[in-house]
Amino acid sequence: MADGLISTRALIEAMLREDATIDAGELYAVAEALGMGDQQVRLAIKRLVTEGRFTVDGRGRGAVLTATDATRAGIEPDRAHVRLMYAQDRGEAPWDGVWHLAGFAVPEAQREARGALRDAIVALGGAPVQGGLYASAHAWEDSLRVTARTTGADAYLTTLSCTDLDVGGARGAAAAARLWPLDELADGHRRLADLATRALDRTAEAEHAERLALTVALVAEFTRAHEPDPLLPPQLLPPDWIGVHARALAARAWSALAEREAASPLRLLRWFDAPLQPH
């Protein structure tokens, strides 16, 4: 349903209900709809219990899994990130024209700190301009300083901002096209749009387990499309950017699935309600 994208562990976490429990019977039914076998699910549950992420009461399809406190806190979506992308699509988050740059040169002796800082930059959508220098269209200084401070690399981080970024003679949208792999990002959004379209086509006639499987697959594909996406402002993107279309289709699909499953206590069906709403 999502090209093998969904791991068994991700499926189990996605099946969490409002009371932090999982109905094993429902879990196995959704896993089957996604093409996963019972043994695959049982082994994943066993690993999660061993890791202390869930407890289990009962056996087989009659069991109830309960998430530990650490598990509950770690699987919520980044609502601020989702809110920003839809606000930009609605024209409610205009870009101020400021580029944010970060550079670092952490000694080899502190390579773990260097790796943590690089990972933070990439996670925030930073693109390499040249050796040790990264760019973003969004303010990221506070987040980077926290990472640098907690890893002991604060003395090696440099941040600056400007309104005129010239990348080999390219500015504005042309510069963004050189810094970020827009073709690859567009491919990810096309996959999301295709899946959302299929979900919309199937939702009305699908049974309960299939609708939940569609929801899990849609969120997984949405995550895959947006994890590498720097959420560039519209001014820095090609006209008719596919990401806007894909997100609109995803929002429609979520709404349709949530409406059909209004009685379901699955948290996944309501994770994106608030971020999708205008403010």
Image (cartoon, rainbow, N blue to C red):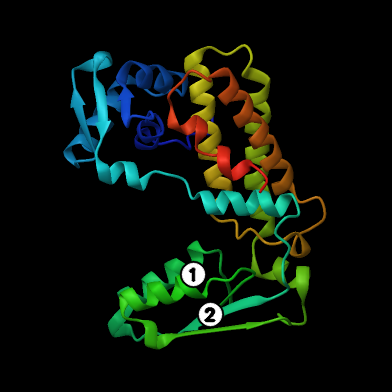
Count of numbered marks: 2
* Residue 147 in picture, x, y percent from top left: 39, 72
Label 2 sits on a secondary structure element that is: strand
* Residue 209 in picture, x, y percent from top left: 47, 16
* Residue 153 in picture, x, y percent from top left: 36, 81
Q: Which mark is residue 102?
A: 2
Say which residue appears at 58% left-offset and 71% top-offset: 139
CB under 8 Å between callouts 1 and 2?
A: yes
Q: Is residue 69 above or below residue 64?
A: below
Name the side, left or right, on which 238 lies relative to 124. Answer: right
Residue 68 visible, this orientation: yes
Query: What type is the residue that disc 2 sits on?
Result: Ala
Residue 11, quarter of the rendered image: top left
Q: Is residue 177 above or below residue 191?
A: below
Labels 1 and 2: the sequence-earlier one? 2
Q: The N terminus is located in which quarter?
A: top right
Say which residue appears at 37% left-offset and 70% top-offset: 116
Say which residue appears at 28% left-offset and 15% top-offset: 61
Q: Which mark is residue 121?
A: 1
Spatial CA span between label 1 and label 2: 8 Å
Crowd class of label 2 (few under 14; some 14 to 19; many from 20; radius 10 Å) = many
Name the side, left or right, on which 276 lies relative to 213. Answer: right
